[in-house]
Image (cartoon, rainbow, N blue to C red):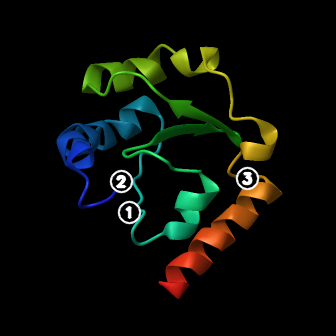
Amino acid sequence: YAPWCPACRQLEATWESFAKESERLGITVGKVDVTQEPGLSGRFFVTTLPTIYHANDGVFRRYRGSRTLEDLQGYILEKKWEAVEPVAGWKSPSSIVMHGMAGLFHFSGWIR
């Protein structure tokens, strides 16, 4: 997310509610300010905001569903993430390519 992003601000209350339910759901919920962490923006190849990822055992899937609390919870409880294609190996945030992309984004922020 970014603090200046209208769509991120619209999602904020729902995301906070989702985070409060995280223990019950057996997950960890977080958020990253891409203006403060440009390297992660590059690593996850964030091109739109807000961008949501589901990560499990080192496998990353981009969430593209509805952004209601019920749908976010259902994605986890009903294991809908299992039907979502994982991010391709070279585009995975844990890949060496995306590690390099993170460095590039971090460096470009430093130059600015």
**Image quarter for residue 3?**
bottom left
Q: CA distance from mark 1 to mark 2?
A: 5 Å
Q: CA distance from mark 3 to mark 2?
A: 20 Å
**Circle 1 residue:** 33
Check whether the beta carbons of the residues at disc 3 and disc 1 lie within 8 A of each other: no
Q: Residue at x 69, y 63 (%)?
A: 101
- Nearer the observer, 38 or 84: 38
**Image quarter for residue 17?**
top left
- Nearer the observer, 54 or 9: 9
Name the residue type under label 2. Answer: Tyr
Q: Residue at x 52, y 39 (%)?
A: 53
Q: Residue at x 59, y 69 (%)?
A: 105
**Circle 3 residue:** 94
Name the residue type under label 1. Answer: Asp
The dot on residue 50 is none
Q: Position of residue 91 (x, y in %)?
A: 73, 44
Mark 3 against mark 2, which lies toward the viewer?
2
Check whether the beta carbons of the residues at disc 1 and disc 2 lie within 8 A of each other: yes
- Nearer the observer, 55 or 64: 64
Q: Residue at x 67, y 72 (%)?
A: 103
Q: Number of callouts in the render? A: 3
**Circle 2 residue:** 1
Name the residue type under label 3. Answer: Ser
Q: Position of residue 25 (x, y in %)?
A: 42, 30
